[in-house]
Image: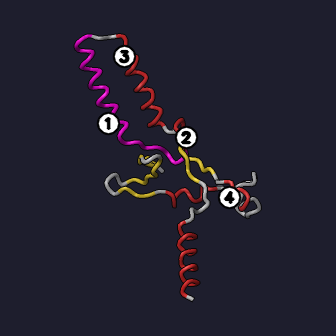
Amino acid sequence: MRKLIACVIGAGFIMGAAPAFAGEWKLNPRACPDLVEDRYDRIEDRRDTRFTTGRRDRIEDRRDRAENRRDEAVTICPARAFYYVPDRWEEKRFAKAKYNNGRGRADGRRNFRSALKYDRRMRMNYIRIDGRKIFVRS
């Protein structure tokens, strides 16, 4: 009897630790104006450091790089920059669901708000992507 109870409890732990099958939210960097601006600033900085090497210009380049680091530290993207990618099981499961979007897969946009977390210091919602906070402007 004890072995049976131990097996049931062990199976419960294993099943509880199994990952849930769910899709994920991904970021489209081209739809986020803040990321596009950061990219253009990096390109402009590389071009600027190649052509001019005067003392005043080096000081200006240093200040530009410091400003770019401050801009890149906080990323704010609109909600339209995120898209939902369902997993392979979710597509099969919700193919005949009542809230599919007509192409045979579930519309995950209804769950976007549940994926967000709130940052009290910034007073904005955010989502973590690759360990980095991306703030969402609604």
The answer for how far apart the CA atoms under marks 2 and 3 are is 28 Å
- Where 79 sits versus 99, above or below? above
* 4 or 3: tag closer to the N-terminus: 3
The answer for how far apart the CA atoms under marks 4 and 1 are is 40 Å
Q: Residues within 10 Å of mark 3 (few under 14, many from 20)?
A: some
Nearer the observer: mark 4 or 3; the answer is 4
The residue type indicated by label 4 comes to: Glu
The answer for how far apart the CA atoms under marks 2 and 1 are is 22 Å
Mark 2 residue element:
loop
- Give the residue at mark 1: 70
- Give the residue at mark 2: 28
The residue type indicated by label 2 comes to: Asn
Q: Residues within 10 Å of mark 1 (few under 14, many from 20)?
A: few
Q: Residues within 10 Å of mark 2 (few under 14, many from 20)?
A: few
Nearer the observer: mark 2 or 4; the answer is 4
* 2 or 1: tag closer to the N-terminus: 2
Nearer the observer: mark 4 or 1; the answer is 4
The answer for how far apart the CA atoms under marks 2 and 4 are is 21 Å
- Give the residue at mark 3: 48
Q: Which residues are magenta?
A: 54-80
Residue 78 in the magenta stretch? The answer is yes
Q: Residue at x 58, y 74 (%)?
A: 11
- Give the residue at mark 4: 90
